[in-house]
Image (tube, rainbow, N blue to C red):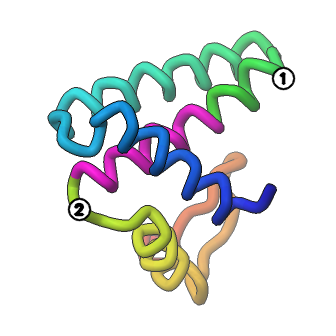
Amino acid sequence: MNLDDLTGLIAVWALDKGLEVAEPEKQMLKLMEEVGELAQGLAKGDDYKIIDSIGDVYVVLTILSMQLDLRIEDCIEQAYVEIADRKGKMVNGVFVKEEDLQ
């Protein structure tokens, strides 16, 4: 399946559960929980946990965007447009934007 198909299935699942009308603040807490699990997977070198957690983060963000009456695709597009021509360099394994290199 491609990402568009999967995103649609996530949206249908969320609608079936009534999650689109739930409180976004609660979904934000769920996002932090999933990011914590991702951090734990990275710390332990647990590939399954890492893959599962990245997927869970995407699911939670998709639902959060629905709750905020946004489309996850639009959010991703906006983020990409913002970074597409970004310049900078790697510093200690982290990409630093050119304007932050002062």
Residue at 49% across, 24% down = 34
Q: Which residue is mark 2?
A: 69
- Outermost residue to the top: 44
Q: Which of the pair 20/34 is nearer the observer? A: 20
Which mark is first along the chain, 2 or 1? 1
Q: Which of the pair 8/45 is nearer the observer? A: 8
Give the main secondary structure of the magenta stretch: helix
Q: Which residues are magenta?
A: 55-67
- Residue 92 in picture, x, y percent from top left: 68, 47
- Residue 43 in picture, x, y percent from top left: 70, 15
User: Can you say which quadrant of the picture contains the C terminus?
Assistant: bottom left
**Front label number (1 vs 2):** 2
What is the secondary structure assignment of the residue under circle 2?
A: loop
- Residue 41 in picture, x, y percent from top left: 70, 17
**Amino acid type, mark 1:** Asp
Q: Which residue is mark 1?
A: 47
User: Separation of disc 1 and disc 2 at Cα?
Assistant: 33 Å
Residue at 67% across, 69% down = 89
Asked if residue 66 lies in the magenta stretch, the reply is: yes
User: Can you say which quadrant of the picture contains the N terminus?
Assistant: bottom right
- Residue 31 in picture, x, y percent from top left: 40, 31
In the rendered view, would you say 17 is above or below 6?
above
Mark 1 Cα-neighbour bin, 10 Å: few <14, some 14–19, many ≥20? few
Q: Which of the pair 84/78 is nearer the observer? A: 78
Q: Is residue 75 left or right of residue 35?
A: left
| Image quadrant assignment for residue 18 | top left
Mark 2 Cα-neighbour bin, 10 Å: few <14, some 14–19, many ≥20? few
Q: Is residue 92 left or right of residue 87?
A: right
What is the secondary structure assignment of the residue under circle 1?
A: helix
**Amino acid type, mark 2:** Asp
Residue at 77% across, 61% down = 2
Q: Is residue 4 left or right of residue 25?
A: right
